Image (spheres, rainbow, N blue to C red):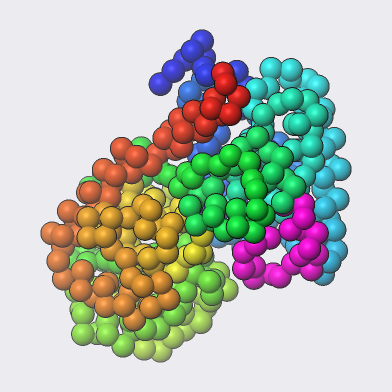
Amino acid sequence: MTTNAAAPLKRVLYHHRTQGKAVEGVHIRGIADALKAEGVAVDVISLPGADPYSSPKAMSPTQQARPWMKWVTKLPEPFFELAELGYNLVAGWRIRQYLNAHRDVELIYERYSLFMFITVLIARARGIPIILEINDSAMVYRVRPLFFLGLAKWIEGWVVRHATGLVFVSGVFRDRLLKAHGTMAPAIVTPNAANIDKFSFTQAQRDEARAHWKLEGHVVCGYLGAFVPWHAIDQFVYRIADRLKAAPHLRLLLVGDGATFDEVQRRVAEAGLSDQVVMTGRVAHDQVPGLLAAMDMAVLPSAGDYTSPVKLFEFMACGIAPIAPDFEPIQEVVQAGQTGWMFKAGDLEQAVQMVLQHSQDVATLKQVGAAARHYVAENRQWRHNILQLLAFRKSLVGH
């Protein structure tokens, strides 16, 4: 790693308008910490009170929002979007105050949010390069449909054209926005990542977790994340349930909670599968390494067709062979049969068949898991993302 004296940049302002929790927090910390490791001073400006370094006690996004944030998100959609638009005034004042106090900022890095434009406006006025990380868009399907869709599209078009550069998590996402907006600032594709040192475990951790959850002597297929309809873990469980008794060697270890958790748990109990389908519910962060250590493979029943699932990289970093849908962003990362397996997106029947099939070959699971971990170590740690980002910035500004 470089030292401060050799840092490629002196100071970066990282701005975001998220709650800084769950996957958002993982990504923000990954980028910020990797920049700091390269000797760059990084200051984060976020929603008041939304600190990505203030780790929640439990792995539950539904439990992490602060009271005032929950109140805002419950507003009727038009008023919620007007609040998002109005936040430009708050963000603008805070960013100007910060820049007045820190004249050595050489890059503003913003996690783009809908209706946000003030940061690009300020950066252009002050001649500071600004790179937007695009994780959301008015052009994608939303569980909560936009009321002011036309305005959101217009602002987004202006922002992606007037930023210095753009970072997308997948090529398909970049191409979708380019088609929608016609022209954009220069862009790079940088999938998500995971640091190997944070996803390493000892044999003792594995043994302890497997003993605690009564998994010894079994092949374990894991899931770590929210129980929400769009992740489809509920539908996966319902489809595999009838076949589990014919596969007594197999256990499912499901970590997390959410809207569909109670129904899944009820159906598992009614089917008499509570021994084979272990549902941990919310767990403390310090329990996660042990739970991952207990897994032999992991399943991602669904994901966004343009997203880069952080959990995929975390499973791979742990040496856990993943089984995931064949969306293009996942194809950009997983080598079928070498670092994981892919089923046709939306075909949960095929996902079930893959889990049952590969659970019978522990040696191959270990081999594929080891290859997945090697791939992440060599290509997809957060430092790799930062080195690409710094090279991109240099190509844009010339120094």
Left or right: 140 as drawn, with respect to 100: left
Residue drawn 52% across the image and 31% down it:
392
Which image quarter is the N terminus in?
top left
Residue drawn 60% across the image and 53% down it:
178
Q: Is residue 37 visible?
A: yes
**Nearer to us in this view, 63 or 2:** 2
Residue drawn 36% across the image and 52% down it:
333
Q: Is residue 339 above or below residue 230?
A: above
240 part of magenta stretch: no
Left or right: 298 as drawn, with respect to 287: left
Outermost front residue: 182
Predominant SS along the magenta part: loop
Which image quarter is the C terminus in?
top right
Q: Position of residue 318 (x, y in %)?
A: 31, 49
Residue drawn 72% across the image and 52% down it:
156
**Nearer to us in this view, 156 or 35:** 156
Q: Quadrant of residue 41?
A: top right
Q: Quadrant of residue 64?
A: bottom right
Q: Position of residue 70 (x, y in %)?
A: 74, 60
Q: Is residue 310 above or below residue 196?
A: below
Q: Quadrant of residue 91?
A: top right
Q: Is residue 282 visible?
A: no
Q: How many marks are shown on the rendered structure? A: 0
Q: Which residues are magenta?
A: 137-156
**Nearer to us in this view, 234 or 290:** 234
Q: Is residue 186 above or below residue 266?
A: above
152 part of magenta stretch: yes
Q: Position of residue 157 (x, y in %)?
A: 72, 51
